[in-house]
Image (cartoon, rainbow, N blue to C red):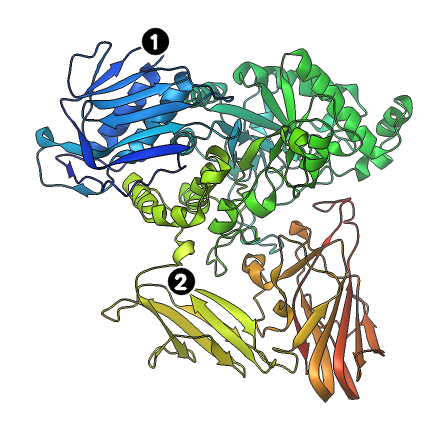
Amino acid sequence: MKIIFVLSLVLINVSVFGQTMNDINIVPVPAEMKVQPSAKFEINNNTELVLEGSGLERSATFFNDYLQQFYGFKLKMTKKNTAKNAIILNYERLDNILPGAYTLKVNNNGVSIAGDNETGVFYGIQTLLQLLPVTVNYKQPILNHILSIPQIEIKDYPRFAYRGMHLDVCRHFFPVDYVKKYIDYLAFYKFNTFHWHLTDDQGWRIEIKKYPKLTAVGSCRKRTLIGRYGSNKYDSIRYCGYYTQDDIKEIVKYAADRYITVIPEIEMPGHATAALASYPFLGCTKGPYEVMDTWGGSPDPFCPGNDSTYTFLENVLDEVMQLFPSKYIHIGGDECPKERWKTCPVCQKRIKTEGLKNEHELQSYFVRRIEKYINGKGRQIIGWDEILEGGLAPNATVMSWRGEEGGITAARQQHNVIMTPGTYCYLDHSQSKNEDSVTIGGYLPLETVYNYEPIPKQLNAQEAKYIMGAQGNLWTEYISNPRKVEYMIFPRMSALSEVLWSPKGKRDWQDFQRRLPVTYTRYREWGTNYSTAFYDLQSSILPTTNYNGVLLKLESKSKNGKIIYVKGLTTNATFNYSDPILISASGNYGGALTAANHKIISNWLWQTFSFNKATGKKITLKDQPASNYPGSGAFTLVNGIITEKKLSQSSEWLGFLGKDIEAVVDLGSNQDINGITLDVLNQEGSWIYLPASVEFLTSENGQNFSPQGILKPGTNGNWLNERKIGIKLHAVTARYVKVIAKNFGIIPAGKPGSGTAAWLFADEIEVQ
């Protein structure tokens, strides 16, 4: 076995400096830990690796392979301790509910790792690796190589039974070697589940011998979208890729050697276009179908009215279950459009024959039938929280992604739950307010991930027992290469590992920040890409006490350097930053970090202000935005920042799910008003729709409002463009401006998210 952390880094003739005794940087933080001040133990070429028990070879081999790859030497493995300098692996009975507990002791005599089972020993090895120094020096010969580690006692155990990471290989395909590398990352941070998303509208990635067209046809799309969804720009490159069954077996074994279970996801009944393109008889219309070359979903699901659909899926699942020994098989179940079913004769016949009320119950029938088949093979299903619609299958586990509500509902129905809400666990979301690469949107900074609590406070103690754990998800619409994968997951995956492993009371955000620099150093030692967004210079826009202009606040979590700023688009004249800057007119401002020698040590952060009569003024909202798109509250709509038309700058958008926007701006005094506009976002691939209508009203007293006009998209010349809605006024004097934007409503058939409530996104209210 070879650890595939990095193929290009080879260390020879190295000497490694020791860590300080009071600077332990283990992630996830152990449950209990005691450090012996100023004492250390030295691992060198004479240290023996002693296996006092059966089944410990995998852990020992993993440790030795890591030493060889990153420190240039291996230890002698033996069954009997004959050396004074030894690392001893054995077993110990540890009274912990979940498997994987271990103890680790380092003293003058060596290192002892005792696990409650093989997995516990392996986790102890991961902790030992993090005690090794990460600073290297290329001067001493390898025979004098010494790794100094602190003398320490650790007692550790997992908090949650399910600690998962997900990888979508359908939108973009990743080779076998990189999937192994991804699994190594999971192992290092004590994750125990790899959720492998293998089929979707944009590609079928697993070989099924009974149905060869699934890979001959379904694994290829004729082209791929360039840029964000809705750009209508494509490359001209045929995109293909799939894993053979031998590939699958290799990866499953590789994961098992690291005590990680691989759970495959075979999407059904929606997200089925790649399968339908391969075998058109599986759809309601019988085709023709094409593998999707853009993101989002297709209006064509599997046809649940035909028995041939179930025969096909059962045959597919038979081969899947032969390849994956996991207890769980993930069947997707999300975002299934149902319009085809409404007009499909065999689907309507199925509804009538089975005594179902509607198409939602037809989906439930489908899921229950598939679950019964999988249960008959001794396995269980996991599905996204849409499988709750129409009634939950008897033994199903729910993966709650559309917030926590689905998980709460399932737990109260005594079903197992895996929490993976987008607000906290979608690592494809932007991690910087100033993201310079295309992402699917959202804003999920490191601190938000770290502070996530998987057990919802709405659950009582008995209901909370059904929360198995949580999972980080990585969807790859905008992630086409391994470097981008790593940039998106690190360091957020490391933070999530502590959420899932460490006792809740041991989690400490300030201490995690202290450990972060060493974590970054380790990424560099691996040759792994990562984001430094946590240390980026950040800006926030605040109201003034008299609502006269806005305040630009600059800050950085970096302890090195000081903040400077400039006015205008040049950096010739700089000013030292101390307090928030008063901005009272349109213009450009830039900020950066400088070192003691005045050298710029960060990228410049630029902010453009566009002032109007509403900028900086008092504003109130009737209903608050959704918790995952809160912007900076109502003030976001009058802070003078008008974003580019992209969701990755989500901190400047207020998002309302299925709700209207009703905002009132107080201009401070009666003023002549010549026009009012509302900035909105149109991004249907992300379920974000233009409002059904926008009404503008004015008032002199804040009580009696006079209508000035109602605009609807496509029917009124004052609808300025796809993101700016406005009216021109003449001879109107008012102090208060009210804007009412009506939500689009339910997303129509054939669109991504069809049948669910649309999002309404707003950025700025402008008054001229």
Image-based side of 619 in relation to 180, left or right: right
Q: Position of residue 377 (x, y in %)?
A: 64, 12
Three-letter code, disc 2: Ser
Q: Quadrant of the C terminus?
A: bottom right
Q: Position of residue 686 (x, y in %)?
A: 65, 51
Does residue 288 show up?
no
Residue occupying image coordinates x 56% and y 30%: 198
* Disc 1, SS: loop
What crowding class fits label 1: few (fewer than 14 Cα within 10 Å), some (14-19), or many (20 or more)?
few
Splitting the image into 4 quarters, where does residue 321 fall?
A: top right
The residue at which mark 2 appears reads as: 556
Splitting the image into 4 quarters, where does residue 702 fall?
A: bottom right
Splitting the image into 4 quarters, where does residue 145 fall?
A: top left
Image-based side of 361 in relation to 428, left or right: right
Residue occupying image coordinates x 51% and y 32%: 164
Three-letter code, disc 1: Ser
What crowding class fits label 2: few (fewer than 14 Cα within 10 Å), some (14-19), or many (20 or more)?
some
Pick the residue in front: 197 or 597.
597
Q: Position of residue 21 (x, y in %)?
A: 24, 40
Does residue 627 show up?
yes
The residue at which mark 1 appears reads as: 54
* Disc 2, SS: loop
Pick the residue in front: 92 or 624.
92
Q: Earlier in the sequence, mark 2 or mark 1?
A: 1
- Measure the C-alpha gap from mark 2 to mark 1: 51 Å
Q: Is residue 583 above or below residue 426?
A: below
| Discs 2, 1 touching: Cβ within 8 Å | no
Residue occupying image coordinates x 39% and y 47%: 511
Q: Is residue 157 above or below residue 26?
A: above
Q: Quadrant of the N terminus?
A: top left
Pick the residue in front: 580 or 298.
580
Image-based side of 360 in relation to 322, left or right: right
